[in-house]
């Protein structure tokens, strides 16, 4: 599998980075109305591991807590690589990791839509910032 790289602007300077797509499907990134690039999945898939525990019953409906057990499938992170992960994976990463590494997720909040076979097309990639 060939390595994908992209030009990224940082402090008004363009830099080149390797891109690793850690979701199990290609990401279609719409650059403008006439140009879309496809970012194929890498060999690793980052997943959040969960388990549930009973919490309480409300109106005869059992409610469970979903607890995070950790994240699997993330390779040893490098500072010069842009990593694409799912939003749930990004939301469960610690603040230092998000600050120290280039970790983004497809922006499914605005203008994104699902295509066939689980492929996502988006118009931007976003970072999660803890405030």
Image: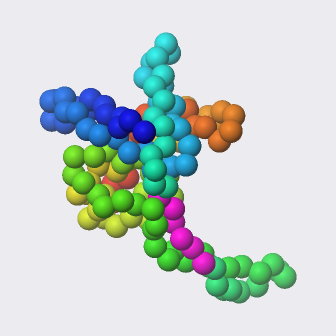
Q: Residue at x 46, y 66 (%)?
A: 72
Q: Residue at x 60, y 78 (%)?
A: 51
* Residue 1 located within the stretch drawn in magenta: no
Left/right placement of residue 76 relative to residue 105 reads left
Q: Quadrant of the N terminus?
A: top left
Q: What percent of the width, then of the height, locates residue 56?
A: 71, 86
Q: What percent of the width, then of the height, locates residue 25?
A: 56, 43
Q: What percent of the width, then of the height, locates residue 15?
A: 19, 33
Q: Quadrant of residue 54?
A: bottom right
Give the main secondary structure, helix, strand or loop, of the magenta stretch: strand
Q: Residue at x 22, y 33 (%)?
A: 16
Can residue 73 be seen at all in this image of the molecule? yes
Q: What percent of the width, then of the height, locates residue 121?
A: 55, 32
Q: Nearer the viewer, residue 76 or 48?
A: 76
Left/right placement of residue 34 relative to residue 75 reads right
Q: Nearer the viewer, residue 115 or 99?
A: 115
Q: Quadrant of the C terminus?
A: bottom left
Left/right placement of residue 58 relative to residue 41 reads right
Tell me the magenta residue range: 46-51
């Amino acid at each position: 599998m060939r390595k994908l790289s992209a030009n990224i602007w940082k402090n008004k300077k363009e830099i080149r980075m390797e891109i690793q797509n850690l979701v199990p499907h290609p990401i279609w990134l719409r650059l403008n109305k006439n140009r879309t690039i496809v970012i194929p999945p890498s060999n690793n898939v980052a997943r959040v591991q969960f388990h549930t525990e009973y919490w309480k019953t409300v109106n005869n409906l059992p409610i469970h807590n979903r607890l995070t057990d950790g994240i699997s499938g993330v390779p040893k992170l490098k500072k010069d690589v842009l990593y694409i992960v799912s939003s749930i994976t990004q939301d469960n990463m610690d603040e230092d990791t998000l600050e120290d590494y280039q970790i983004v997720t497809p922006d499914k909040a605005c203008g994104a839509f699902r295509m066939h076979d689980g492929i996502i097309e988006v118009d931007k990639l976003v970072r999660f910032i803890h405030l």
